[in-house]
């Protein structure tokens, strides 16, 4: 019996990007287009600042570990949806939001409510590479700084408008290559909703 159900739609890669090693600073988180194709290994995207099998824990897991604790890297790749970026821009009353400003690695289209995909969903690319969704990538102040550079006075509106729209983080389950234009099949775990409410 299969553990997954395939979604009745196919997404598409619009742009592949990397944040070059050593460029993630307090001043900028901007990523850069790869030129159309990126090699994907078990450590993540080649040349990407967030690549690695392990990483130092950050504020996102502060309830679990002291900041700086060495942990498994399930935040290798950041994925955003073109449709959700358009909604954020509309809410902020600005012309556009570029994936580079969010430090994203993949800009995709055709996957409804990408940010709300269940954890452990699989994204299977035309090349055979497969990424596993870890969790929602919660909005933070760093993209707001990038937006502020282009749209002065608007950066402060990012977090409010990016809730449940900022995309997901993912890790590599199967190596390969991902290119602009590749198709994406979406597989979700066959699992009922946990019948416990936590406020």
Image (cartoon, helix red, strand yellow):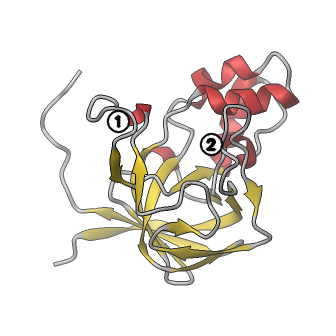
User: Residue 61 got which mark?
Assistant: 1
What kind of element bears circle 1?
Answer: helix
* Residue at figure coordinates x 77%, y 30% from the top left: 147
Q: Is residue 189 left or right of residue 178?
A: left
In this picture, is 95 found above or below 22?
above
User: Camera-side residue: 61 or 102?
Assistant: 61
Q: What x and y, as percent, mark residue 145?
A: 73, 27
Foreground tag (1 vs 2): 1
Figure quadrant of residue 148: top right
The image quadrant where one finds the C terminus is top left
Say which of 196 and 130 sits in front.
Answer: 130
Label 2 element class:
helix
The image shows residue 127, relative to residue 113, as above or below, that is: below
The answer to which quarter of the image holds residue 182 is: bottom right
Q: Is residue 104 above or below residue 146?
A: below
Could you tell which of marks 1 and 2 lies nearer the N-terminus?
A: 1
Is the residue under label 2 in contact with that under label 1 (CB below 8 Å)? no
Q: Quadrant of residue 106?
A: bottom right
Q: Residue at x 57, y 39 (%)?
A: 166
Which residue is identified by label 2? Answer: 84
Mark identifier at residue 35: none
Across and down, in percent, residue 190 comes to 23, 62
Q: Residues within 10 Å of mark 2 (few under 14, many from 20)?
A: many
Is residue 11 in sight in this rendering? yes
Q: Residue at x 67, y 32 (%)?
A: 26
Q: CA distance from mark 1 to mark 2?
A: 25 Å
């Amino acid at each position: 019996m299969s553990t997954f159900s395939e979604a009745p739609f196919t997404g598409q890669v619009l742009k592949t990007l990397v944040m070059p090693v050593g460029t993630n600073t307090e001043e900028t988180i901007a990523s850069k287009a790869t030129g159309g194709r990126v090699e994907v290994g078990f450590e993540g995207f080649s040349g990407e600042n967030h690549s690695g099998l392990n990483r130092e824990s950050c504020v996102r897991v502060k309830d679990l570990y002291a900041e700086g604790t060495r942990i498994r890297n399930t935040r290798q790749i950041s994925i955003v949806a073109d449709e959700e970026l358009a909604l954020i821009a509309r809410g902020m009353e600005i012309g556009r939001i570029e994936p580079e400003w969010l430090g994203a690695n993949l800009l995709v289209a055709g996957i409804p409510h990408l940010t709300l995909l269940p954890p452990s969903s699989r994204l299977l690319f035309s090349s055979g590479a497969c990424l596993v969704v870890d969790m929602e990538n919660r909005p933070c102040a760093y993209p707001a700084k990038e937006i502020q550079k282009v749209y002065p006075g608007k950066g402060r509106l990012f977090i409010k408008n990016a809730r449940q729209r900022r995309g997901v983080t993912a890790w590599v389950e199967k190596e390969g290559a991902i290119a602009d234009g590749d198709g994406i099949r979406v597989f979700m775990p066959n699992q009922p909703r946990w019948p416990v409410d936590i406020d």
